[in-house]
Amino acid sequence: MLAHWGVLDFAGGIVVHAIAGFAALASVIYVGKRRIVDAPHNLPLIALGTGLLWFGWYGFNAGSELKVDEITATAFLNTDIAASFAAITWLFVEWGTRRSRTSWACSPARSPDSRRSRPRRYVSIDSAVIIGVASGVVCYYAITLKNRFQWDDALDVWGVHGVGGFLGIVLLGVFASKSINPNGATGLIHGSGTFFGKQLAAATEPPSTPSRSRS
């Protein structure tokens, strides 16, 4: 339905990240806290998992093109660049507030906005840098807010996937360019507010599926 309306989502990221992230928050609030909460304690496994996920996203983002061309290369490069800038930005923000930790530095690298399957195919490398920086800042403070409210979201699904996914939907509406992908759209900074409005609507309140009339 959203695709027919003109919303872009290159590998199902709206469902995989944004909707799932906010569904996780609802589940956390409904279920409540665990009786026994263990803090992250195995940094080698955390780093290994982040590396495996990073490698997997190359295939997910670039591989979703189902062929090898300039769009595939752009998706591949943007995946790496945005995630790298997100992680570095996260570290700088955290250094300004408290002592940095490796386990926290891994979070922005798996942020759906920094590695987003949605914008990678439709934005320039310069835009990927901005998206990565924005992801590192916004997701950091989303998780900080989660900790302040003491929501027991063990994997930071809401802060990383939900909030990062929402940001990715909106920023695609800002930075998309047909010069990068002719099959894409024209974003807000390139002179089109229509596509930005569609992405914003998809992020906040997706259109309902029309009911079928009975014969």
Image (cartoon, rainbow, N blue to C red):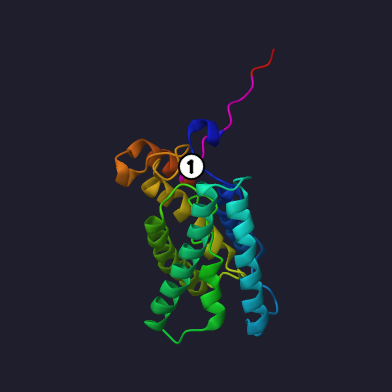
Q: Assign a secondary structure to mark 1.
A: helix
Residue at position x 62%, y 78% in the image: 47
Residue at position x 48%, y 42% in the image: 202
Q: Residue 170: x and y, percent?
A: 42, 49
Q: Residue 52: x and y, percent?
A: 66, 69
- The image quadrant where one finds the C terminus is top right
Q: Is residue 172 above or below residue 32?
A: above
Residue at position x 51%, y 40% in the image: 206
**Can residue 113 be spotted in the picture?**
no
Residue at position x 48%, y 74% in the image: 148
Q: Residue 164: x and y, percent?
A: 49, 59
What predominant SS class does the magenta segment belong to? loop
Q: Is residue 21 left or right of residue 204?
A: right
Q: Identify the image quadrant of residue 167.
A: bottom left
Q: Identify the image quadrant of residue 93.
A: bottom left
Q: Is residue 206 magenta?
A: yes
What kind of residue is marked 1? Ala
Near-viewer residue (134 or 130): 130
Q: Is residue 10 magenta?
A: no
Q: Identify the image quadrant of residue 92.
A: bottom left
Q: Is residue 125 above or below residue 190?
A: below
Residue stretch rendered in magenta on the structure: 204-212
Residue that carries the numbered disc 1 in the rendered image: 202
Q: Residue 51: x and y, percent?
A: 62, 72
**Total number of numbered labels?**
1
Q: Is residue 43 above or below residue 191?
A: below
**Farthest residue, direction top:** 215
**Can residue 100 be spotted in the picture?**
yes
Near-viewer residue (49 or 139): 49
Q: Is residue 20 left or right of residue 136?
A: right
